Image (tube, grey):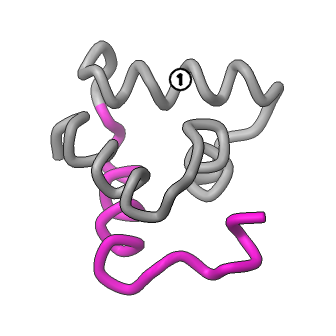
Amino acid sequence: MTGAELKAIREGYGLSASAMGRVLGYSGPKANVAVHIRRLERDARRIPPSVEKLALMYAHHGIPKEWCA
């Protein structure tokens, strides 16, 4: 998965970078989570295999609405 593909999934759900980070399981300050996701989206960091699998699952089956709040 490329960063552009991850970003397309996030944007397809209308999520902010920090919200996408939360549904992918990242914790910590909101700003830090957002920076990390943006780095993944720019291919500045390798997307971990577990994050890739989860993002692909969301792309195919959706994200539970209560997780996007």
The quadrant of the image that shows the C terminus is bottom right
Q: Is residue 44 above or below residue 40?
A: above
Amino acid marked by disc 1: His
In the figure, residue 48 lies in which quadrant? top left
Residue at left offset 61%, top offset 28%: 34
Q: Is residue 43 magenta?
A: no
Farthest right residue in view: 29
Question: In terms of secondary structure, where does tag 1 sit?
Answer: helix
Locate residue 33 relative to residue 5 in the image: left or right: right
Percent across and percent down for residue 63 are: 53, 76
Q: Where in the figure is residue 59, as x and y percent of width and height?
A: 32, 71
Residue at horizontal 41 percent and vertical 72 percent from the top: 58
Please state the horizontal and vertical placement of residue 56, each as a whole percent of the image.
29, 66
Q: Which SS type dominates the magenta stretch? A: helix
- Decide: is 51 above or below 43: below
Where residue 68 sits: x, y (%)? 69, 65
Residue appearing at x 57%, y 19% in the figure: 35
Residue extent of the magenta highlight? 47-69
Q: Which residue is mark 1?
A: 36
